[in-house]
Image (cartoon, rainbow, N blue to C red):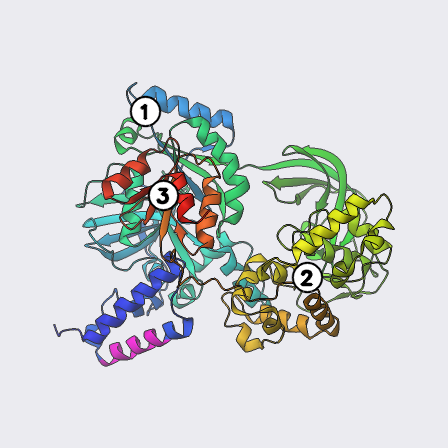
């Protein structure tokens, strides 16, 4: 065989590094254009030296052949499922059984990780090279989707470092929510039906006949278990396995470890309320696993599932009730949302009397009429929704879109290609109130006390007609409102003054530009000052991560309106912070560093500590490896601390950590 030209080797190495930075570390160091250039050069060189093409070259991800159908694959070891639990009582029962089956001297450590809502997939590596990707199928036999799996950029085509001679790693294929939104934006813009949810979309994308289509879908693989581990280093626990996965180049599932079931139960609520909402992909619960393989072996399996692991899922709670009426609420963009008023019903811990119907397409899909009996659902903190009609009322009243705005009486329009109806009046008081509430909300300018009541009073009195008017309010204005006294007015003005200092991402989010949420606002504020953003071109905007043609058009349209121009001028005059929010990741002393937090911290939660280091440009991980920069060990730190000591990773106490980050 001829020798591979060195430039080809170098380019492959470089591209692999960039894939890793982009897909695993979330920290790209070159632009997409630069990346494309490297790839194009490699393709040219390989075209000139076809002998040098190897199956693990990054150019081979895109997949050549189009398969007619998928061949069946018999799994070497069946892909089992997990038992589901939904309540504290059930998980405690599972724990009791574990403890009963283990010898008294064996105290189990529990690893708890997200139950990733994706498509299970098994990847086989022989001597470090990816040889097969298969779906789960019925657990015994799956489909061979190798060419498609090769297109996932966070799947290593060749394992890094020492690896077992045969490895069949298992995990979930997912589409991140942001990628899903972007894909659907494109589908709608092209006049096609949007995909229903990220999970279905990921499944459909992985099972494309043409791998080139899979390649455009930005799927990711999250490793969580294995079927075969042969001829490699001895691993003795699930945590060691996940660390090894990360070291071999996989995106491994993130875990927390606990040694008591009480802590697992406490984490269940904390994860649902604080962590789950921030994850970039869908999760439908936790998986609790006994960490030690020796203990797993003692516990063994039932016919269907392991005894050493269990899913601890979040129930979507349902209840049935009757739709008494449908009213229309006007959002800050003028979109009119139909809301069902239902007979009050107790569900998931609260009494529900209003349920969103989203839009008129949804009403048509449900076939809903007033008077129908419906099943409603409330999952986590999400707004309750109607699942289906369980009993259709005889002579039920049809629900029609309103002809005029329920708040201001202006005409109601529907834009082509969009499902929502809009109130056509930019100074509609209902829209204004929503706009103001959003502006002052916690995720935006965080003006405490500027809530629904205050907004109603100020708008109804005609004192506030746009966001800009907030900053010209005087004490006299406030004292004219019912029940306002000196102290309350002074506090309000102080809060308003304070809000002028908020960093630009908050302000950009606060403006309420359609399609621009918190994350997008951050990306924009990192590239532009507010003045620059207001005059940025469509092309330039699209160079911002996650900004596609629709978002870019929405931004330029927003800033082209004369009333927005005068609003921006007013805000500038009032002294709000318009400065670009430079996050100098590359220069920060924390850039590229990774932190693992373990044990109880006393001054903050581990999540909060994680947020702090991320704000400084560092990353956090759930597991310790030789690449970890710091392990911060709180009270009662266990296996992670031990691992750090074994690997010689720097261990910090909580107070040393606080000093390091300058707190
Ligand atoms: S461990 C014996 N860990 O859930 C099964 N599975 O009902 C061992 N899943 O199809 C798998 N997240 O693909 C494991 N963190 C996680 C998981 C996970 C999602 C899927 C898995 C399986 C199903 C089990």
Q: Report the residue at 77% width, 59% height from top.
A: 432
Q: Nearer the viewer, mark 1 or mark 3?
A: 1
Q: Is residue 42 magenta?
A: yes
The residue where tag 2 is placed is 419
User: Callout 3 environment at 10 Å: few (<14), some (14 to 19), or many (20+)?
Assistant: some
The reply, left or right, for residue 569 in relation to residue 274 is right
Tell me the chief SS of the magenta region.
helix
Can you tell which quarter of the image residue 306 is in?
Answer: top left
User: Callout 1 environment at 10 Å: few (<14), some (14 to 19), or many (20+)?
Assistant: some
The reply, left or right, for residue 468 in relation to residue 649 is right
Q: Compared to 161, does 545 lie above or below? A: below
Q: Compared to 643, does 366 lie above or below? A: below
Could you tell which of marks 1 and 2 lies nearer the N-terminus?
1
| Element at label 2 | loop
Q: Position of residue 140 (x, y in %)?
A: 33, 43
Q: Position of residue 222 (x, y in %)?
A: 38, 50
Q: Is residue 305 visible?
A: no
Could you tell which of marks 1 and 3 lies nearer the N-terminus?
1
Structural distance between the alpha carbons of marks 3 and 2: 40 Å
Can you tell which quarter of the image residue 333 is in?
Answer: bottom right
User: Callout 2 environment at 10 Å: few (<14), some (14 to 19), or many (20+)?
Assistant: some
| Element at label 3 | loop
| Element at label 1 | loop
> Magenta segment, which residues?
37-48
Structural distance between the alpha carbons of marks 1 and 2: 56 Å
Mark 2 residue's CB less than 8 Å from ligand 1: no
Q: Report the residue at 66% width, 43% height from top.
A: 384
Q: Report the residue at 45% width, 41% height from top.
A: 606
Q: Position of residue 287 (x, y in %)?
A: 42, 37
Q: Return the mark for residue 139.
A: 3
The residue where tag 1 is placed is 107
Q: Quadrant of ligand 1?
A: top left
């Amino acid at each position: 065989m001829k020798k591979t030209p060195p430039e080809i080797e170098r380019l492959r190495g470089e591209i692999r590094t960039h894939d890793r930075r982009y897909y695993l570390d979330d920290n790209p160091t070159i632009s997409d254009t630069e990346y494309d250039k490297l790839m194009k050069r490699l393709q040219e060189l390989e075209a000139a030296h076809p002998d040098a093409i190897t199956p693990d070259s990054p150019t081979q991800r895109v997949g050549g052949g189009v398969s007619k159908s998928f061949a069946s694959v018999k799994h070497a070891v069946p892909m089992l499922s997990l038992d589901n639990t939904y309540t504290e009582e059930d998980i405690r029962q599972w724990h009791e059984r574990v403890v009963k089956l283990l010898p008294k001297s064996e105290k189990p450590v529990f690893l708890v990780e997200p139950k990733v809502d994706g498509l299970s997939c098994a990847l086989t590596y022989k001597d470090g090279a990816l040889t097969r990707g298969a779906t789960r199928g019925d657990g015994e036999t799956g489909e061979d989707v190798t060419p498609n799996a090769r297109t996932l950029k966070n799947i290593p085509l060749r394992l890094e470092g020492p690896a077992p001679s045969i490895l069949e790693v298992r995990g979930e294929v997912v589409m991140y929510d942001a990628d899903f939104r972007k894909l659907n934006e494109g589908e709608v813009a092209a006049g096609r039906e949007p995909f229903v949810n990220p999970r279905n979309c990921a499944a459909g994308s992985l099972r494309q006949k043409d791998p080139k289509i899979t390649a455009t879908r930005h799927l990711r693989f999250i490793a969580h278990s294995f079927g075969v581990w042969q001829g490699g280093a001895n691993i003795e626990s699930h945590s060691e396995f996940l660390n090894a996965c990360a070291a071999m180049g996989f995106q491994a599932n993130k875990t927390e470890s606990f040694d008591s079931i009480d802590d697992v139960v406490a984490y269940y609520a904390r994860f649902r309320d604080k962590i789950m909402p921030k994850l970039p992909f869908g999760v439908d619960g936790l998986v609790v696993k006994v960490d030690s393989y020796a203990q797993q072996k003692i516990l063994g399996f039932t016919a269907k599932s392991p005894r050493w692991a269990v899913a601890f899922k979040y129930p979507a709670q349902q209840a049935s009730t009757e739709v008494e009426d449908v009213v229309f609420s006007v959002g800050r963009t003028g979109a009119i949302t139909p809301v069902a008023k239902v007979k009050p019903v107790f569900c998931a811990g609260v009494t529900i009397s209003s349920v969103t119907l989203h839009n008129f397409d949804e009403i048509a899909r449900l076939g809903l009429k007033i008077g129908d009996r419906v099943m409603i659902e409330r999952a986590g903190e999400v707004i309750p929704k109607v699942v289906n009609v369980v009993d259709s009322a005889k002579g039920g009243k049809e629900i029609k879109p309103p002809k005029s705005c329920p708040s201001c009486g202006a005409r109601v329009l529907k834009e082509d290609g969009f499902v929502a109806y809009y109130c056509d009046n930019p100074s509609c008081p209902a829209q204004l109130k929503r706009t103001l509430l959003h502006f002052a909300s916690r995720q935006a300018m965080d003006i405490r006390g500027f809530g629904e009541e205050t907004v109603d009073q100020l708008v109804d009195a005609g004192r506030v007609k746009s966001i800009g008017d907030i900053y010209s309010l005087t004490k006299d204005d406030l004292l004219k409102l019912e029940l306002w006294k000196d102290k309350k007015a002074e506090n309000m003005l102080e809060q308003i003054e304070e809000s002028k200092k908020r960093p630009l991402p908050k302000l950009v989010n606060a403006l309420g530009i359609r399609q621009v949420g918190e994350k997008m606002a951050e990306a924009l504020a990192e590239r532009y000052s507010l003045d620059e953003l207001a005059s940025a071109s469509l092309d330039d905007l699209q160079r911002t991560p996650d900004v596609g043609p629709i978002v870019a058009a929405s931004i330029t349209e927003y800033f082209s309106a004369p009333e927005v121009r005068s609003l921006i001028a007013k805000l500038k005059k009032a002294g709000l912070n318009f400065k670009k929010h430079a996050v100098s990741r590359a220069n920060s002393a924390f850039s590229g560093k990774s932190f693992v937090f373990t044990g109880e911290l006393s001054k903050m939660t581990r999540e909060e500590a994680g947020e702090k280091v991320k704000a400084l440009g560092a990353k956090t991980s759930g597991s310790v490896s030789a690449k970890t920069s710091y392990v911060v060990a709180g009270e009662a730190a266990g296996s992670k601390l031990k691992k750090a000591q074994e690997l010689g990773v720097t261990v910090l106490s909580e107070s040393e950590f606080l000093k390091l980050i300058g707190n």
